[in-house]
Image: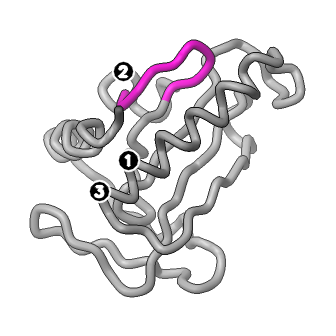
Amino acid sequence: MEKFGYPATLLKELEHWVILLRPAQVTLGSLILAAKGDETAYGALPLAAFTEQGAAVAAIEAALAAFCRFEKINYLMLMMVDPNPHFHVIPRYEGQRAWQGITFADAGWPGPPQLSSSVDLNPEQIAALSREISANFR
């Protein structure tokens, strides 16, 4: 979680999961859904984490729908560098979205997201975007 800026990027904390702002914004509203435990395999998470994951996904989709009006959403579990279960949550849209004068294009639309095409935010932008998105969580 620390690799993704925790605790500064924390949007919502549940019992088994945290929802974080992804500092490198592939598209506007890119998040991380990360398991809080020490498990290094998705299948090793406790059963309650899988149940709670449904509530986390519903909260993410409601918050991002209000914030950036995504057309599709991708959940990517890559775990190549970071061994703990986590998903890169990438809202998808045709064209661009703008926030505080910064343009965020979905470079891969309508294909797979292009993770290397991202906007890196500075600490002040991360704080401001975190506040704005977290206001959309119930």
Mark 1 surroundings: few (<14), some (14-19) or many (≥20) residues within 10 A:
some
- Point out the frontmost of discs 3 and 2: 3
Mark 3 surroundings: few (<14), some (14-19) or many (≥20) residues within 10 A:
some
Per the rendering, the mark at residue 67 is 3
What residue is disc 2 on?
7
Task: Give SS at disc 2.
Answer: loop
Q: Which residues are magenta?
A: 10-18
> Which residue is at a point 64% across and 83% down the rendered structure image?
111
Q: Nearer the viewer, residue 40 or 35?
A: 35
What residue is disc 1 on?
63
Q: Earlier in the sequence, mark 2 or mark 1?
A: 2
Q: Are marks 1 and 3 in contact (CB under 8 Å)?
A: yes
Location of residue 48 with respect to 134 vertically, above or below: above
- Main secondary structure type of the part rendered in magenta: strand
Question: In the figure, residue 87 lies in which quadrant?
Answer: top right
Q: Disc 3 residue type?
A: Phe
Q: Nearer the viewer, residue 78 or 53?
A: 53
Q: What's the CA distance linking mark 2 and mark 1?
A: 19 Å
